[in-house]
Image (spheres, rainbow, N blue to C red):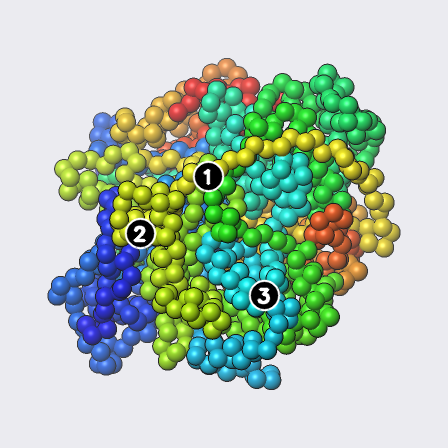
Amino acid sequence: MNSGSIKQLKKPLAIRLGEQTVLAKSLVMAEHPFDRRDFLKVLGWGGAAVALSGCGNGSVEDGKETVVSYVETNDYMIPSISVYFNSTCTQCDAGCSITGRIREGRVLKLEGNPDSTINRGKTCGLGQAGVQHHYNPDRVREPLLRTGDSGEAITWEKAYALIAEKMKDVSGEEIAFLSGGVSGHLKVLLGNYLDSFRSKNHFVYEAIAPAVMRAANKKSYGVEMPRFNISKAKVVLSFGADFLGAWVSPVHFSQQYAQFRKGDEDGQRGVLVQIESKMTLTGANADRWLVVRPGTEGILALGIINALGAAGLRLSGDVAGAVKGYDKARVSKDTGVSAEQIDKIVALLKARTPSLVLAGSAAEGYAHGSQNAAAINLLNQVLGNVGKTVEAAEVVPFPQMAPTTGNTAALKKLNDGLAAGKYKVLFSYAANPVFTAPGAMKFKDNLAKAGFKVVFAHYLDETALQADLVLPLDSALEDWGTQVPEYLATCAQINIQQPLMEKLHANTDGKGTRGMGDILLTLLKQRRAEEYKGFADYYAYLRGALLKNKVALGGHKVDDDTFWNETLSKGIIKLEGHVSALSSRSGTAGLSLPSPAAIDAQYPLQLIPSVNASLRDGRHTNQPWLQESPDPLTTIVWDSWVEIHPRKAAELGIEEGDIVEVTGKNGSVKVQAYLFPGIHPDAISIPLGRGHEALGRYAKGYGVNPFQILDAVFDKETGELALHETRVKVSKTGSRVIVVKDEGPVGGRQMGKKIAARLPSDKVKLSEEI
Amino acid sequence: MSVTSLLENYSEFRHFHPVDDVPHNPYKWAMSIDLDACSGCNACSVACYAENNLPVVGREGFAHGQAMHWMRIERYWDEDGREFPDQGAQFLPMMCQQCEAAPCETVCPVGATNHTPDGINSQIYNRCIGSRYCSANCPYKVRYFNWYDYPTTDNVWPAEMNQQLNPDVTVRGKGVMEKCTFCIQRVTVAKNNAKNEGRLIHDGDVQTACQQACPTSAISFGNLVDPESKVYKQWKAQQVELDKDAQIKDKEEGGSELRGYRIFEELRPYPSVMYLERVRESAV
């Protein structure tokens, strides 16, 4: 690092040094990407040398560079001393606040920010792996342009000119912008860019977002995402909501769960009953896990209401009418849950209040998913939980920054447009539909019909490979941003995202990565130069936008610089949100649940694509920590598997490790079998997220992608994909592998030793514990 | 002292851990893990990879039993023969139990693994010759061997990925054994900070990486000889004593109502990790 390359950053960054909060007006960092040798030089070949691996990209040994130590150390760049910056995790959209540990200019580790009411200093495994997104060796580093079958690296200047040229004569109707969930100022800029063409074609697509639940909640409670107070509940009855795994805001719910178990308020331990067809992580933690015939969750909910009424709970006329036919005998026959078990649940719900009923993705994933969710929400209303454990969340008073949400209904609309050849230019950001769209939609083929395809990408994923122009993005740890989480814990807040280090792949030769905000700003300047000329970059835009609203954001007493530095230092702006009361309309109108479907002779099994807390929809599969992090329930690593109940496996003559072919109407996959007791015998389950044909070295070629064999069945009310409606058959291929997993050869047995021990609750006095 | 004399009078010379006349002072690091809070989510394990420069060994390596996860989540099923696991699964975070009388220590031919004054079972990488006796003798199977030189192995830490390595933690080379250190690098920093302020480490000054990440706060870590520490209070409330191979409370008729227990206590390794039993509702 010769001294000529060190420059003052113009951007003030706020730094937390140890426990003390220090505000810094400037931070000196190297302009070039940091490399290992530079740090060693800085350290004077000090103790860190042993800690770093031996594959540097410097060339001190060759005598091409000289070792220059810090004569005068730069502020906050003390060798061996870590500094901490606050930012926001973007590995999923729960909006956890993080604190990055930075040493010698490199971000080393991410921890939770204790000041966030969402994650309170905690992180999940997915969040921990955020550094591997940033340092990933397979990131795209320069804009790529396709010419025929080959691609070439071009400069940003050329890329922008190309976009301007392509956008010159298109109408708003002919543009489509596909994105994952976006919020904050990025959403504002994106909206403004589309507005500049009078285009309304923003398609928001998150493959595993709880879209049906949102719609059902809107109907039952008046809001899409109320607040669920797990910690206040004495009983949680969860219909397939994997709130400890991948559902909505798992780190937040995990903390609530811990409080719920300890009975923080009165020492009474909360009881968790999980009802689902395939055991999730949450199901594995339940006091009682009830296996239910796939798709009959709503029937069971109505059956419980009926039984509650029979047990003396007063039901209103319309509710009593709606559940009339759902007597225990019928419900038990339809769902496979015994009458005795229903009685126990009813007794528990009556004895311990308040309770909380959750409708998760497992209940939603059917053609009658909305009906299932409505029936489950009705149970909450009947139990009087609305207003107690289901509360209105605060709303951030800037609606233009609120998160956009969407799922496959939006993708389907886009897909139909593409099939009709409607779009001359297509943008895609933070979505990988070629990988995640159900095979039956033929999305890849339809995508080819778009005139010019621009993909903003971190990796060359399946969608980027179909693009005409790939624009490389900064990692989440290099970029600026604001974010409004969809699920707000206890107060309204805006999360701040700020760079934790200099860009790894800086803009040299006009190439390198850029931030999404910067790109949108440049594109907007092509359209509305006058309006945006005051903003040199996205940073300036963000700063300006937040300072303009300083008073509303709680900064009325301080000057601009102090407000800005404090905001960055905290990483969170907490706001006085407004709360509107939940409506508690009992949603019995139009409630009708189909009888369980008869078993299809040709395709007798229900395919449940399961969501793993680490891999989710597969966008982070190229982070090797996540590949090597065993699935909690099967302990399998680096591969896909199909879960089959031992009874069904015995019927079919399948043993662990058999490669089986799972065939549906829309194709088949070959995958290793794992005998799993936590699944309905008429269902099988393959996890989502693996089976990439691209993305990078840690993802490509590992496992299979169940999205590809999904049928295009949609929820009748919302038009969202019914993820669990694919029927398949399973046949042996004759080959067999040894399943690569963490559990030992005796599986999950303790061999009579006291290893993982358990006590019944009536023996324990939790309130006396520390 | 002749060898004969040593062998004949071994009990006089044998050094016991824990020693009650000279307890660890001023620090004895210990943990307690609440299995009723643990959800088995694996955040602790990934956090450990991030903090301690653990190599990713890939599918082949994992298949050969070469995984390097210092912290792993074990998953157990009920063994009552029921068709469905209707009481869920049992998760158990397992890492080095930092035994007071560690079976791994006595078998090391070169003294590479030994007991620190803080009561941690430490591994000295540059003394280790890779005999793997320690691993064979560990009842918990929490020692991990470097079968390859991971820093130079393809795709373990390729360019850029190597910049994430924690400079406070040695990257291990081929042929040495490694294991959980209770994040000794963090303890060292906290010790130095406390020393500069002329005091001892207070409870909460230092968190292990797994503890810090844990979304349900199931893991507590602290100084077992500090009466102010949470770990001390928990061990005391649970009546689990470090230097016992069977706890007095377990001899009560009908078993104890307290949840604290240590795994394989009867083997007399005197582990420094107490687990709190998982609770399951009796009403359903």
Residue in front for this viewpoint, A391 or A275: A391
**Chain on which label 1 sits:** A
Q: Name the side, left or right, on which B32 lies relative to A411.
A: left
Give residue A198's mark. 3
Specify the farthest residue to the front. Answer: A530
Image spot of residue B32 (x, y percent) = 40, 33
* Residue at x 30% of width, y 36% of height: B204
Which tag, 3 or 2, sits closer to the chain's start? 3
Disc 2 element: helix
Which mark is in front, 3 or 1? 3
Query: How much space separates mark 1 and mark 2, taking CA atoms?
Result: 21 Å
Q: Quadrant of the N terminus of chain A?
A: bottom left
Amino acid tagged 3: Arg
Give the quadrant of the C terminus of chain A: top left
Q: Can you tell which quarter of the image residue B9 is in? A: top left
What x and y, as percent, mark residue A484?
47, 49
Please report the residue visible at 35 percent of the width from the left and 48 percent of the height from the top. A550
